[in-house]
Image (tube, coloured by chain):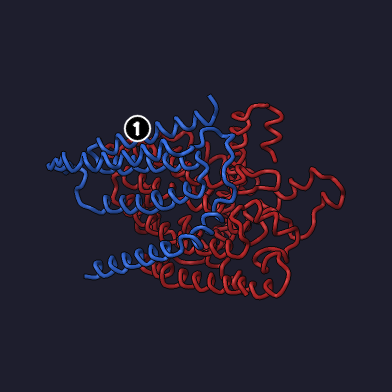
Amino acid sequence: MTYYTVSFYLFAAIILLSAYFVVTTKNVIYAAFNLLLTFFGVAGFYALLGADFIAIVQLIVYVGGILILLLFGVMLTNKITDTEIKTGAFQVLPASIIVGMFSGVLIASMTNNRWIVSANTPVAADTLRTIGNILMNQYILIFEVLGVLLLIALIGAASIARK
Amino acid sequence: MIYDFLLQLTGNAAISSLINSIIPLTFIIPFALFAVYLERKVSAHMQDRLGPMRVGWHGWLQSFADILKLLQKEDIVTADADKKLFNFAPVLVFAGSYAAFAAIPFSSAYIGTNLDLGLLYIVAVTSLVVAGILMAGWGSNNKYSLLGAVRSAAQIVSYEIPTTLVIVTVIVMTGTLNLHKLSTDQTSSFYNWLIFGGYAAGWHKFALIPSMFVGFLVIFISTLAEVNRTPFDIPEAESELVAGYHTEYSGMKFAMFFLAEYANMFAVSAIVATIFFGGFQSPFGYLGNTLGISWLRPIEEFFWFASKGIFFVFVQMWLRWTLPRLRVDQLMAMCWKYLIPIAVVNLIIVALIMVL
């Protein structure tokens, strides 16, 4: 067992266990903090795959942004820990169709890609520069449209909050 | 690099990585003891008092006495506290602030991991501290703790934006996020430091000086707010919230919060020093180069790094005992109405100068 394999299984265990607790726990706060561990484990996976920039962005956006916002929402809501948060509705057919399609995409990308499976595999150097060049040349239109989309979301949120 | 030396010595990557990762701790703990003493002395002399005088010469053993006291204290967990979160929070807070040290170059011979995205990595891992503080505030089951934690999180999340904008300014200028490369590029003379326009010759250098001073001020203020120090210490404002998120903590768990706070203070000072003040570079030549002793140079570099870091820690203490605490609305106005617009305009100016 190399260190690479050990850390892979460590992160895999963190992700699976914490994701299981997120779904099963009755306490919303525990769910949120387990989600922190899940995000952390996924960031570890990205780092193992040589995608250092994605790993860091994962931490900044999900741990530093979304999760903190989630915790804020939970903590500022009155008596959230004792309420039943499970939904009563079970939509078996639409759920199984969507899950089937999604797992199809995942399995396809899993089998068709060459994944980095050891520390000796060469990874791309200077990833940030490469990503920046691709975003600013090849995908400039999509990048700008996404920026406008985020701006619209921001203005929408501000206008809803003012009401 | 110390890691290569350890690898040669032990011949085992796991053992040498472990030793390599413990090295910053051997610096932080003595530093924290020293900084606690310094804080008390600085505050005392600013208020025309003497400060601790009893334990040792001018009270220099006071911090050791304090640590011994904290070690003996009973570990109290309040009856209604959420025990899992309460016990895990100090670990998470310290882990978050310690993780930042992995990318900080202490001298040209020692850096935890030579990350290409070091600066961005530090911004990312410090978000674990926010989660830890929220965990502590919730786990304590105390209104003061919860209020302090929520205030602290809001403050850190807001002030991350001007910090990141100044970091982007630095990327635009230097084209690198690697703190080790950033330090080695600002070669060993003070006029090559980024605060004096950087190491590139030409008119750019002089045009950049005002922007660099503005950038330095913005990042210094915002990192001061990120470590919850006065004048931005509303999360633990004694007069309103007892002690904020660590009100219910005692003994070693309290000591861990304290250690994390001082580790954080040094980390942000070191980052500011590395970005704008040449990191481990000496302001003028090296004695090792003059005498021809090659092993002296890394030690000198460590001396300069530690001196710059401790100097900025001293400035933080100085501000703490000079300025009154801001109100919550003033704090948010400071960030969103002043620092962020200034940082954005500064970024645009630097980008224009670099393009021209």
* Residue drawn at (82%, 52%) of the image: B287
Instruction: From the top left corner, tell me how far across and down residue B235 is, in percent.
Output: 39, 56
Farthest-out residue, top: A1
Q: Amino acid at mark 1?
A: Leu
Residue at 33 percent across and 50 percent down: it is B145
Assess disc 1: are there few (<14), some (14-19) or many (≥20) residues with their C-alpha within 10 Å of its C-alpha: some
* Callout 1 secondary element: helix
From this viewpoint, is residue B20 visible?
Answer: yes
Of residues B244 and A24, the one nearer the viewer is: A24
Residue at 61% x, 57% y: name it.
B176
Residue located at (20% from left, 41% from top): A95
Quarter occupied by the C terminus of chain B: bottom right
User: Quadrant location of residue B202?
Assistant: bottom right
Spot occupied by residue B60 in the image (x, y as percentages of width and height): 62, 46
- The colour applied to the residues of chain B in this rendering is red
Q: Is residue B292 left or right of residue A3?
A: right
**A108 lies left or right of B52:** left
Q: Quadrant of residue B45?
A: bottom right
Q: Nearer the viewer, residue A60 or A115?
A: A115
Colour given to chain A in the rendered image: blue
Q: Which residue is mark 1?
A: A17
